[in-house]
Image (cartoon, helix red, strand yellow):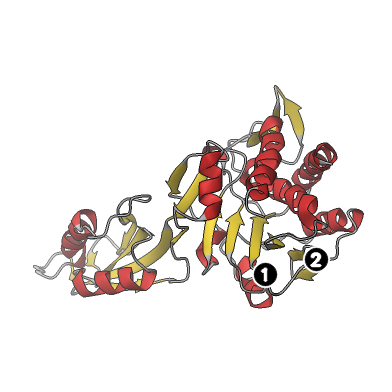
Amino acid sequence: MKEKLTTNAIELLKKLIRTQSFSQEEGQTVLLIENWFHSEKILFERSQNNIIAYNKYFDKRKPTILLNSHHDTVKPNSAYTKDPFNPHVEDGKLYGLGSNDAGGCLVSLLATFTYFYARENLKYNFVIVASAEEENSGRNGLNSTLPQLPEIAFAIVGEPTLMQLAIAEKGLVVFDAMVKGTPSHAAHPNEDNSIYKTIQSLEWFRDYTFKKVSSALGEVKMTVTQINAGTQHNVVPGHTDIVIDVRVNDKYSNQEVYDIIKENAPCEVKPRSLRLNSSCIDENHEIVKAGIEMGRKTYGSPTLSDQAVLSCQSLKLGPGDSKRSHSADEFIFVTEIEEGIELYIELLEKIV
């Protein structure tokens, strides 16, 4: 059964690569995923461009594991030398946009879910969500399906981790800051130049240290990524705008980080959103212990995923390498998908 599922999963991935599915444009790839469930005779629900399915013997009295990965992609960058929509294998590498992020994870989880679908007397239920709008943190992705789902005991989020255990993931807050000054003609003295005053704010964001350090994710990291001020050479602007990218560890909520910055920063700050929080799973959780028994290593992930919208404990785990994500000539090794399905099944067999 596993061999057939693996073959079918790789073929599905090739079909997904051929089909454009930029975030908010997943209307065709969702049909391919529907076809998977039709062919396996598995009932499913569609919510916008998200697909939801439950194991055959779902029992409300049992805890539920969520399996999730996404079928949307970023747009290909200008450095591609290969057709991003032409799935082809060279030297064991399956090339194509979304092959690594996160098509390989998605089809591996679909195969894993299908493997367990008709199993009776499981300790856990399974629900799988093949989600949309992950790459742009859209509001019609996984987060939009959560009110429809039962209470989740824990989740496995399929993202490329080389099948190592990402037991924590940094959250993200983007802040817009404003340093106010006094506008004036450049020829006259002005002791309240907003651009010069910005130096103090830049130094604060560079030097401020949050006290709580995570064993998995390290420190909260603040990075100034944009500055904008002025429209004319002879006019001192009345304000200077700064954008700050803040990666939040699992010791703080996004709200707590905002409160600290608001109280201490020497400028006005406003968050664009506070909903993309950090996430983690207890190192002593049975799924983590099972993975460690299999020789998997634990680490903290600096990149954002759909874990950010989950309130339950979650583990990021999947075939492929995060360093290939969003890169030119994206690829995943065929053997990574084969091993990914094997490892997902072996891991879950230990606890269900």
Q: Is residue 133 left or right of residue 242?
A: right
> Label 1 to label 2, Cα distance in Å?
11 Å
Residue 197 location, quadrant = bottom left
Mark 2 Cα within 10 Å, few/some/many (few <14, many 20+)?
A: some
Of label 1 and label 2, which has the lower sequence position?
A: 2
* In the foreground, 252 or 292: 292
Callout 2: SS:
loop
* Placement of the N terminus among the 4 image quadrants: top right
Which residue, given by chain and number where applicable, does mark 1 sit on?
62
Front residue of 240 and 343: 343
The amino acid on which the numbered mark 2 sits, given as a three-letter code, is Tyr
Position of 46 with respect to 261 (left or right) is: right
Q: Residue at x 31, y 68 (%)?
A: 257
Looking at the picture, how far across and down is residue 174, in whole percent? 40, 64
State the image quarter where residue 32 is shown: bottom right
- Seen as rendered, the residue at the extreme top is 91
Residue located beneath label 2 in the image:
57
Residue 46 placement (x, y as % from top left): 78, 69
Q: Are marks 1 and 2 in contact (CB under 8 Å)?
A: no
Question: Residue 280: x percent and y percent?
Answer: 46, 58
